[in-house]
Image (spheres, rainbow, N blue to C red):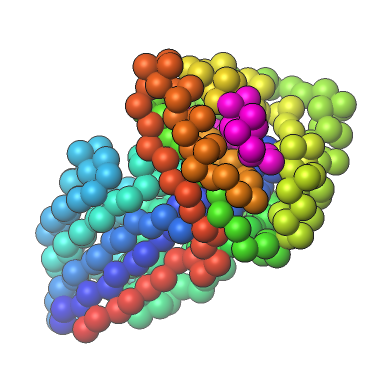
Amino acid sequence: MKKQVTVTIPATSANLGPGFDCLGLALALYNHVTFTAEFANPAKTVKKTTLTIQATGLDAEKVPTDETNLVYQMASCLFERVGKRPSHLHIQQENHIPVGSGLGSSSTAVLAGLLGANALLDDPFTQAQLLDTATAEEGHPDNVAPALLGGLVLGVMHGEQVHIEPLPIAAQRVVIVTPDFQLLTKDARAALPSHISRQDAIFNASRLPLLTRALETAAYNKLALAMQDRLHQPYRLPLIPGMAAAFAAATAAGAAGVALSGAGPSLIAFAPAGHEEIVGAVTAVFHQHNLASHSWILPIDTVGAKIRAFQ
């Protein structure tokens, strides 16, 4: 039997300043993954899947086309759990989210693999089970939760279980600028201190509810205060050439609030208007530091992951 499934996953911006490892926002920029699978007679056990992978679009050359591909690894995880795998599987990835950019590209791969395999297997796993599996792979829910559900999402870990709370957010557009600079996740994590002060913990804890309320009500005048952070950005900004100056340039150009997107190197800026001016100011700073950049002005994605099945 031949089955085909297409999964569309949005980019995400995690942390947004004070929401370190728990807050994320889905953006209207998407990766599309199509699975074409052939399943043998149910009485026949398939021990190994014949795999082909093709990647197109942004950073396609960075996508593995063998069994180390993250989409395939997550799909294979579900095939193993169920005890049923396709005899042949072709994965077509159409990427619009830059790899290693702080925009949740790895989360899109994780979710695409899980959602695609689940659909091919006729949905044996619930959304909550898939979210738990995705979070276990990623280590925290701040990207996978909004990518799955859309919108602004708070994710709380309790042991190995994920509790998620979708939060209201006003319709708006945000600026994303991604400098052409490789910031390895291990380096971004290694830059963080092993201990924080009580004052810094209180600083972030007091700003997170202010941020979520400001995003709900489009209170742009509160974002500069609400998006302040002492837990990760002070340690990560120096790793990215020109980023501190880019924050200042975005603010001077009219941004109400600016933050690293995830661990970086992307920057996210919120503003009621003047988005093009903010893009121009930030890209100019990166150009001064000999860095090319990609930029987008994006609406919020409110739907999350989408699945289309063909048979």
User: Looking at the image, can residue 164 be seen?
Assistant: no
Q: Which region is colored magenta?
A: 247-265
* Total numbered labels placed on residues in the image: 0
Is 155 located above or below residue 62 in the figure?
below
Q: How far across and how far down the image is residue 93, in percent?
A: 25, 55
Residue at (79, 37) in percent of width and height: 225
Residue at the image position 33 percent from the left and 76 percent from the top: 308
Q: Nearer the viewer, residue 310 or 209?
A: 209
Quadrant holding the N terminus: bottom left
Residue 224 among magenta residues: no
Write the residue at 64% across / 39% down: 255
Tell which of 83 and 37 is nearer to you.
Answer: 37
Q: Quadrant of the C terminus?
A: bottom left
Note whether 221 is above or below 146 in the view shown: above
Q: Find out whether residue 249 is within the magenta segment.
A: yes
Q: Is residue 4 left or right of residue 239?
A: left
Residue at the image position 56 percent from the left and 40 percent from the top: 268
Left or right of 9? Residue 217 is: right
Quarter assignment of residue 235: top right
The percent coordinates of residue 226 (x first, y second) are 77, 41
Q: Picture quarter containing residue 306?
A: bottom left
Q: Is residue 206 left or right of residue 159?
A: right
Residue 306 in view here:
yes
The answer to which quarter of the image holds residue 123 is bottom left
Residue 114, given in percent of the width and then of the height, sits at 39, 62
